[in-house]
Amino acid sequence: MAAMLHDVIEDTGIPKDALAEQFGDDVAELVDGVSKLTQIEFRSRAEAQAENFQKMTLAMARDIRVILVKLADRLHNMRTLGPMPYEKRQRIATETLDIYAPIANRLGMHSICTELEDLGFSSLYPMRSKYISKAVDKLRGSHREIIEEIRGKLQEKLEERGLPGRILGREKHLNSIYNKMKFKQKSFHEIMDVYAFRIITDTEDDCYRILGAVHSLYKPLPGRFKDYIAMPKANGYQSIHTTLFGMHVNIEIQIRTEEMEHIANNGIAAHWMYKSDPSSVSNANQARVDRWVKG
């Protein structure tokens, strides 16, 4: 309800009390919280990017659902930026890359974060975005056989060991390709010459068995192994990362369970799916957010 009504206080002059009367105090508080976030002025890029500023924004939203509604609203704005005047598009895209994408990232909401980043990038740099996009499509076409061959060998190895797992190819996002080229001084081909896969399985135990299986198939690269299952990231992200060398190319593999996959993509929002009592969920989530904000 709050998502549907998020602009009402801001745009129509209908007071918070009237919303509370018709839709309840909870909804009125959420709509009011979203309106207050919308009114924040971002005076400078330095202020916008300051870690403290992100923390303040999150702390202001006493209820994490305010941030979720605001992020959904911003994602919708970014998807429909096209018809707006150039200056407004630039301002909204810059604010999105400086403020909202990092907040989504901090809350572990990978899907929203990468879409915000790619939409922001294509609004700010339409020509660069088109160029990288075309180059990615062209390269993907010429690499299709290698990708399918690696996927086939991984699948074969899992079946041979009787391990459950679905294998997904991982797409590289335009904004992340551009940033690696710009800040890490890497060429487009250096970035794209890594073949990335994700293996989703049933249990934590299966993750470690699959790790053993892929290491027996291709040689692991030293120093490129991370166990975020045993030591999760601050935002709750869990996965095993390993880089292998096989078929004359580097192969990056992430191994995780279905639940870890949901949490990696949807972060804080994913936790609602795993609990039945909504009041305990929102308390648990709020505690988790408080930890993340302090982290």
Image (cartoon, rainbow, N blue to C red):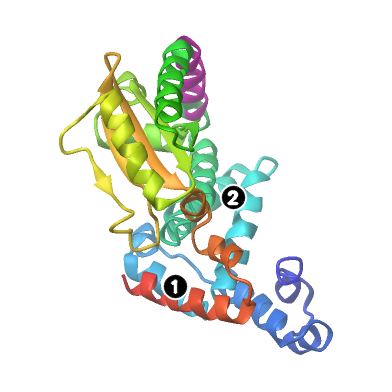
Q: Looking at the image, is 220 positioned above or below residue 146?
A: below
Label 2, label 1: how many angstroms apart (C-alpha)? 32 Å
279 and 95: which is toward the camera: 279
Disc 1 crowd, CA 10 A, few/some/many (<14, 14-19, 20+):
many
Outermost residue toward the left? Answer: 222
Q: Position of residue 27 (x, y in %)?
A: 71, 79
Q: Which residues are magenta?
A: 129-142
Q: Is residue 67 visible?
A: yes
Residue 289 tag number: 1
- Earlier residue among tags 2 and 1: 2
Determine which residue is flagged by label 2.
88
288 and 40: which is toward the camera: 288
Q: Quadrant of the C terminus?
A: bottom left
Indicate the amino acid at tag 2.
Lys
Task: Kindly report the secondary structure that dominates the magenta region of the rendered protein.
Answer: helix
Indicate the amino acid at tag 1.
Val
Q: Quadrant of the N terminus?
A: bottom right
Q: Position of residue 3 (x, y in %)?
A: 71, 66
- Per the image, is 133 magenta? yes
20 and 219: which is toward the camera: 219
111 and 276: which is toward the camera: 276
